[in-house]
Image: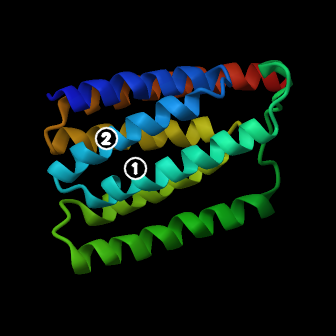
Amino acid sequence: MSWIELLATLLGIAYVLLMIRRNILCWVAGNISVALQAISFYNVRLYADMALQAVYFAMGCYGLWLWWKKQPHSSDERPIKRIESFRRWVPVGFVWIGGSVVWAAVLRTWTNAALPELDATLATASLVATWMQAHRYLENWLLWIAIDAAYAGVYWSRGLLLYVVLYAVFVLMAWQGWKVWRRMLR
């Protein structure tokens, strides 16, 4: 375990706690965390995950901008939404599946990635979930539960034990986020 992993872990936890509370500072904590995680993932050849951190950083800037632009006076005024229409899920699924296939092909062809298919699939799902968070869709938390549980296994296989703990904590926090946001939606 390095100081980079430790700081990234602590800031990752702060990110989720602030996201649950719908505090705009979640995006700042998240961006610092992902920058540090990118270094860790490079060192263990999880290139899609490393690249994902750069995209997370951009999505973090987008989320910060989106929340800042629509900044109400209190967090209670930040509406939570649901994806209720099947028509809304179709493009989300298309992006996830299509992105996963393309990203895995790139990793297999041009890198020595450790787990190209799984890495690409989880990375693409993470982008979808982050987009859902930026738009305050309740269902983002359910997707994060599945993603974080799978990532814990990936990090275990690569010897990133602190990240295993972090992602196990993320699963629990995502469950809490689901409950809190669902209660607020009612």
Q: Amino acid at mark 1?
A: Gln
- Say if 2 sits above or below 108 in the image: above
Mark 2 burial class by Cα count in 10 Å: few <14, some 14-19, many 20+? many
Tell me which residue sits at (80%, 39%) in the image. 81
Tell me which residue sits at (64%, 40%) in the image. 64
For the residues bearing labels 1 and 2, Cβ distance under 8 angstroms: yes
- Work out whether residue 176 or residue 13 is closer to the camera in this orientation and state it: 13
User: Is there any visible trace of residue 116 in the rendered image?
Assistant: yes
- Residue 70: horizontal and vertical position, in percent? 82, 38
Q: How is the image coloured?
A: rainbow
Name the element at disc 2.
Answer: helix
- Work out whether residue 14 or residue 149 is closer to the camera in this orientation and state it: 14
The quarter of the picture where the N terminus appears is top left
- Say if 110 sits above or below 183 in the image: below
- Residue linked to disc 1: 53
- Residue linked to disc 2: 37
Q: Is residue 135 left or right of residue 16?
A: right
Which numbered dot is residue 80?
Answer: none
User: Is there any visible trace of residue 137 in the rendered image?
Assistant: no
Q: Is residue 130 left or right of residue 73?
A: left
Query: Residue 181's quadrant in the figure?
Result: top right
- Residue 34: horizontal and vertical position, in percent? 39, 41
